[in-house]
């Protein structure tokens, strides 16, 4: 009896032989498939280690990214703090400046209220006794001004009340030549309806000498 006949007559041997042939054929086909696809068979343990290493790398990247975010947050928190520290002296200077301004305003208001009660009022229209010329004096607190315009000269005066007198300076402008002379003097209130206007000197320009003087009385209109 041949080997083939013996194998076929015994079902168990036949089945085992078929399994061996099928396994051999399948393994050969798997090997051919790996070669054709340019791949290699990998052990399960090796594959698991590779997967574990990939997981660890991903975790490290996630940790590094989180640390970078934390650092950015810290930097963002530090920049405003540094800016606040830098601006603090400026704020202090501004605060001191504001306080000084308020103090100055308070002192100015106090001084103004005092001078308002200390200086007489000459606000209104006045007429010069010698020739009847008129001027309209404007007074704000203890500062007086007036402007007069004639055919030959214009006069612009400004003065402050000091030691019982309005100390004034007047710009006298020649209409024809446009030359200006500055006059210095004072206004002295005689009573509620009269004041005395005195010129003591000039700057010596144009058509008036430095020693020029005049003294007139004005009456309230």
Image (spheres, rainbow, N blue to C red):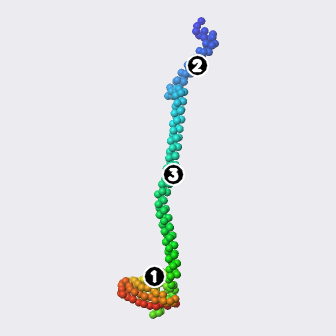
- Report the mark closest to the observer, 3 or 1: 1
Residue that numbered label 3 is attached to: 77
Q: Is 144 positioned to the left or the right of 211 in the image?
A: right
Q: Quadrant of the N terminus?
A: top right
Q: Callout 2: 10 Å neighbours few (<14), some, many (20+)?
A: few
In depth, the one of 188 and 153 nearer the eye is 188
Q: Callout 1: 10 Å neighbours few (<14), some, many (20+)?
A: few
Which residue of the protein is positioned furthest toward the bottom in this rendering?
130
Give the structural element (helix, strand or loop) at label 3: helix
In depth, the one of 136 and 164 nearer the eye is 164
Residue that numbered label 1 is attached to: 162
Give the structural element (helix, strand or loop) at label 1: strand
What's the CA distance linking mark 3 and mark 1? 60 Å
Question: Measured from the top left, where is residue 122 in percent x and y?
Answer: 50, 85
Q: Earlier in the sequence, mark 3 or mark 1?
A: 3
Task: Name the residue rendered at 47%, 57% in the picture.
Answer: 86
Task: Name the residue rendered at 50%, 47% in the picture.
Answer: 71
What's the CA distance linking mark 1 and mark 2? 130 Å
Residue that numbered label 2 is attached to: 22
């Amino acid at each position: 009896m041949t080997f083939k006949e013996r194998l076929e007559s015994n079902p168990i041997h036949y089945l085992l032989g078929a399994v061996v042939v099928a396994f051999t054929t399948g393994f050969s086909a798997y090997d051919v498939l790996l070669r054709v696809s340019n791949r290699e068979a990998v052990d399960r343990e090796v594959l698991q280690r590779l997967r574990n290493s990939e997981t660890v790398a991903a975790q490290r990247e996630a940790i590094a990214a989180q640390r970078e975010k934390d650092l950015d947050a810290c930097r963002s928190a530090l920049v405003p703090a540094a800016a606040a520290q830098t601006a603090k002296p400026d704020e202090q200077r501004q605060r001191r400046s504001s306080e000084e301004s308020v103090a100055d305003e308070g002192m100015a208001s106090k001084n103004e209220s005092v001078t308002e009660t200390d200086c007489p009022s000459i606000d209104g229209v006045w007429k010069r006794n010698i020739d009847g010329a008129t001027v309209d004096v404007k007074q704000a607190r203890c500062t007086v001004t007036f402007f007069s315009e004639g055919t030959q000269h214009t006069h612009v005066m400004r003065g402050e009340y000091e030691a019982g007198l309005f100390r004034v300076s007047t710009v006298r402008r020649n209409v024809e030549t446009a030359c200006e002379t500055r006059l210095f003097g004072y206004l002295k209130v005689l009573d509620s309806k009269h004041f005395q206007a005195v010129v003591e000197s000039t700057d010596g320009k144009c058509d008036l000498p430095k020693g020029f003087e005049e003294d007139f009385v004005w009456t309230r209109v």
